[in-house]
Image (spheres, rainbow, N blue to C red):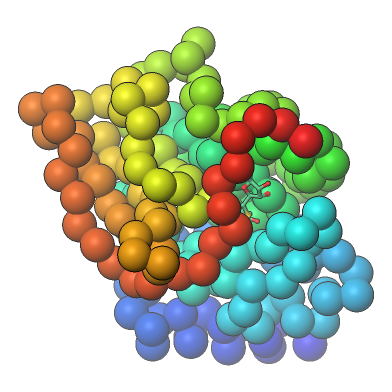
Amino acid sequence: MLDVRKIRLILELRESGISNSDVLSALETIPREKFIPENYRYQAYENIALPIGNNQTISQPYVVAKMTELLEVENNHKVLEIGTGSGYQCAILSKLARRIYTIERIKNLHERSDKIFEELKLTNIVSKHEDGNNGWTEQIPFDRIIFTAATKNITNRIFSHIKEDGIIVCPIVKNNKQVIIKYIRKNDKLISEEFDDVLFVPNLKGIN
Ligand code: SAH
């Protein structure tokens, strides 16, 4: 049953404009139901965000696919994710990159996602319980950075983490809305391009 729904979802994503076949096959490979509480699992392959506890959500598959596509991940890349949440976005990235460093501020979610990574044998993920806005200085520089919580702006600290020509994808809060922005670091500046309107939980300071 889940398989039929999964195929339908992949087709729907294609029709919505997701064309990168590596991204689509990562979405086909990673079992989204594993990242979802049991009572919502029957909806795992619907194109909607779902609650994961602690007032947080697992993103809509379209948004995961879109942000992953915009990130242009290659298999030798080192990626930083801020906002592990359920771990689903991170698991998708782990199929495309060399290594993912992911940070979650809520301890419970950090621990739960870590267990799932282990169960699924996603051994190229390193995770920590921290405020992601502090970055991961020991691992600088990163080829790619993705935020999965709505953020006001890219701070100098995070800017210092990205390589020249590197890409940052982030939901940015703008005039009471949120929009996905893709930034490319060129000549020590960030060049930005706007994409879809989205609805993410806010990027909060400190840990919980
Ligand atoms: N990528 C996730 C989306 C989860 S929602 C998924 O695929 O499920 C965003 C997550 O970002 C939440 O779990 C929230 O606790 C976390 N978050 C918010 N602000 C943060 C911060 N400053 N540092 C780390 N994590 C943060």
User: Do we see residue 142 in this rendering?
Assistant: no
Q: How many numbered marks have been drawn onto this rendered protein structure? A: 0
- Which one is in front, 55 or 61? 55
Q: Which residue does the image show at 62% across and 79% down from the upper left?
A: 48
Q: Position of residue 39 (x, y in %)?
A: 90, 75
- Above or below, 95 relative to 38: above
In the image as oriented, which residue stretches furthest toward the top?
138
Q: Position of residue 186 (x, y in %)?
A: 12, 33
Foreground pick, 103 / 68: 103
Locate residue 147 relative to residue 107 in the image: left or right: left
Residue 34 vs residue 191, the one in the foreground: 191
Instruction: Indicate the position of residue 201 as horizontal and vertical percent values.
Output: 60, 58
Q: Is residue 149 left or right of residue 195?
A: right
Q: Quadrant of the N terminus?
A: bottom right
Residue in the picture at 48% in, 86% down = 11
Residue 24 at x, y percent in the picture:
47, 68
Give the residue displayed 34% in from the left and 60% down from the top: 174
User: Could you tell me which quadrant the C terminus lies in?
Assistant: top right
